[in-house]
Amino acid sequence: MNLNSLFKADFLTSANRSQLLVISLLLAAIDVVLFYVLNQPVHSLASAHLASFLCASIAGLIALKIKPKQLLTFVLITLLVVLLRGGLLESLVSIMPALAAMCICALFSAVMLIFGYQYMQFINTNADTKWKYWCIAVLIYLTLLKLFYLGASELIFEEAYYWNYAQHLDIGYLDHPLMVAWIIKAFTFVLGDNEFTVRIGAFLCWFITARYVFKLTRETLNEASAYWALVLLAALPAYFSFGWFMTPDAPLTACWAAAIYYFHQVIVKGNAEAWYGVGIALGLGMISKYTIALLGGAMFLFLLIDKDSRKWLLRPQPYIALLIVCALFSPVIIWNMQHAWASLLFQSEGRVASGHHFSLPRFISNVLIFITPFGVMSVIAVVQYKKIILTRLQASIDGANSINRSYFVLAWITLFPIAVYATLSVFRASKLNWTGPCWLGFLPFLALLISQKADKSTPKLLAWSARAWPATVVILMLIYGAGLHYLSLGLPLANYPQNTHLMGYAGFGAEVETLVTQLEKERHEQILVVAMDRNKIASGLAFYRNKISPENKPALSTASGHLFGVGALMYEFWFPTAQQNGKTMLLIGEKSDELSDASLLSRATPIGEIKTITTHKNGKQTGTYYTRLVSNYRGQASKLPTDDAGSD
C-alpha cells in the first residue's frame, strides 16, 4: 500500500486541521511549562516528563471532547506516546540542554497524541482497509521505538563484549564468527564509539529480514498476510530484540530469512538461479553464527525426502551454492588453522565438556517467551487446521498445488531445527535465543491465520488465535515501551536490580578511568585493569572507559578473570597469561572475598586495602563493586574454556 494514503484528504479533513494544530501547540506549551516547573533536583527526568505529559494529555482529553467509549483508545495512545518520547528525550539530552530537548519532545508528542487519536478514529470508519492502516501504524510505532532508544540505555554486557571483538578486529573468534565484530567496527569507525553506533547494525539487519519475510509472504499467500507477517516480525519478542540488541543473532536472522526465501524460490518456483542466493545467505549466515548450519541441514534433508526435489541433486547449481558457502566461510577456517582449531573445538569438545543438563522445561519456557503463548497456540492451530486454512486461501487465488508445497517446505525448515533444539535440551542447557530465527519460515502462515475472517464454521482455536493477536500486539508495544523507558530514564518508584548487566556503568567506567589515571601518575607505570568475572565487568568497563578517554584505548588495558583461573573466552587470546607476568593490576570484583582469596594472593602481591565503588543510574543504586591494587603478577597457563564459560 502506498504510504501517501496515510495522509489522504479524508483523513486530514476528518476534523478541522487548524483546530487540531492549535490544540497540539496548546498541549505542547502546557507540557513544557510543567516540565520546567517539575524538572528540579528533587525530581528525576523521568518523573518530570511523565507527569508533564500526562497533565497535558488530560487537557487534550477535554479539548477533543473524548466520549466514554473512546476513552480507552485515547488512554492507550497516551501511554504509547509518552513511552515513545522517553527514548527521544533521553537521546536528545545527551546533545542539548534538557529544556531545549523537552521543547522538541513536547511538540512531537502533542502531534503524535492528537493526530494519532484522529488516525485511529479514521481507521474505525474504514472497515474494508482497517487492517492495512492498523498494520502500518504498528510498524511505524515499533520502528520509531527501537530507533529512539538505540542510544538511550547502556549496552548489555554481550554487546559490550562484541564491541571488544571490534577493538581486536580479526577474521575469527573463539565463541562466534566474525560478522558481528565487522558490523560494529564499520559503524563505530565512521560514527564513533557509542551505544547508538553499536546497535544501529542490528536495527538495519531487521529491515533486511523484513524485506525477505514480506516478499516470501506476498508471493506465497497474499498482500494482507504479508502486512501481518511484518507486524509479527516487528512485535514478537524474538525479532524485536534481535532488531535492537547488537548480537550475532541480528545478522543471523537476516541471513536465515534470505536463505528461506531463496530456497522457497528453488523448490516451489523452480528458479535455478535462486541457488546462488541460498549459497550467499548461508555463507554469510555461517560467518554470523554457526547455528544456521541447522537450516542448511534441513534444506539438504528436504532434497533427499522430497521426490520432486531430488532432481536438484543431479544439477550443478546446489554444488555451486555449496562452494559459495565454503568460500564465504573460509576466513573462519583460516583463523581456526592459525589457532589450533580453537573455535571448532570450543563448539564441539567444549560444549560436550559442559556436562549433562536436562533443560527441556526451560526450552519450552524460552519458546513461550520468544514467540509468546499466543504464538505457540497459533502454531498449533496452523498445524492442526492446515487443511481449513489453506482451502480458504485456495478459494480466493489460483495455484492450490504451489500453496500446499509452500506449506510443506516452510513447515519442514521451521520444525526440523526446532526439533533438533528440543532434543538437545534433553542433554544440555537450553539457551534463550536458540529458536529465534527458526520461526521465520512459519510467519507467513501465522499471518494468514490472522488475516482470514472467521465465520460460524471456523474452529474455536483458529478463531480465538486470530482474534487474540491485535490485543497481544498492543500489550507487547506497551511492554517494550515501558521496558526501554525503565532501562534508560527509569520509572518512578521502580528501583534497579543490583549488579545486573551494565546498569550504571557510564558512571562506573568514568570513576574507574579516573582512578586508573591517578594510580598511573602516582606509580609511574601502566595499570592493567582486571575484572574478576568471565567477561561482563571487563567488557563493560572497556567500553565505558573508552567513552571517557578513547585516546588511551582502554580496551587494550582491560582484562578479565582468566588471569586468576576464571574462563574468559576471547580475553584468554587478547591477554595471554604469560605476557602479564610482573604487571601491576587494579582488580575489580562483585564480591570483596574474591579479592582476598588465597589463590589470588599466591599470584600477586596486594597493595593497600580493598575499596568499594557504588554504581548509580538516575539517582538510584545499581550495584556495588570492590577494587584492590596488586603488583608483581605471576601467571599460570589457562585451559580451553568449556561451554560453562561460553556465550550463546
Image (cartoon, rainbow, N blue to C red):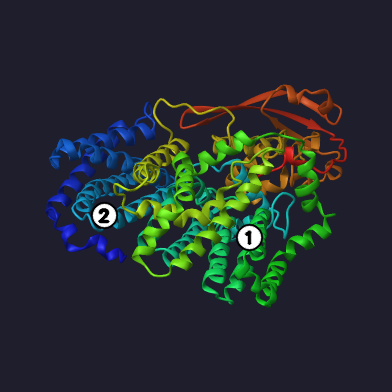
| Quarter of the C terminus within the rendering | top right
261 in relation to 550, above or below: below
Q: Amino acid at mark 1?
A: Gly
Position of 491 compared to 512: left or right? Answer: left
The residue nearer to you, when weighing 223 against 517, is 223
Disc 1: which residue: 285
Q: Report the disc number at residue 210.
A: none
User: Is disc 1 surrounded by few (<14), some (14 to 19) or many (20+) residues within 10 Å?
Assistant: many
Residue bearing the label numbered 2: 130
Q: Amino acid at mark 2?
A: Lys
Tell me what residue is drawn at x 85 percent, y 45 percent. Answer: 579
Q: Position of residue 179 (x, y in %)?
A: 64, 58
Please, what secondary structure does the residue beneath circle 2 have?
helix
- Label located before the other in sequence (2 or 1): 2
Residue 339 in the figure: left or right of residue 433: right
Marks 2 and 1 close (CB-CB < 8 Å): no
Q: Is residue 115 above or below residue 312?
A: above
Disc 2 residue crowd, few under 14, some 14–19, many 20+, Cα 10 Å: some
Q: Vertical placement of 267 versus 170: above or below?
A: below
Q: CA distance from mark 2 to mark 1?
A: 37 Å
Quarter of the image with the N terminus in it: bottom left
| Circle 1 SS class | helix
Which is in the foreground here, disc 2 or disc 1? 2
Between residues 156 and 266, which one lies in front from this camera angle?
Answer: 266
Q: Looking at the image, is 466 positioned above or below residue 332?
A: above
Q: Residue at x 15, y 39 (%)?
A: 66
Whole-percent x, y for residue 64 in the image: 14, 43
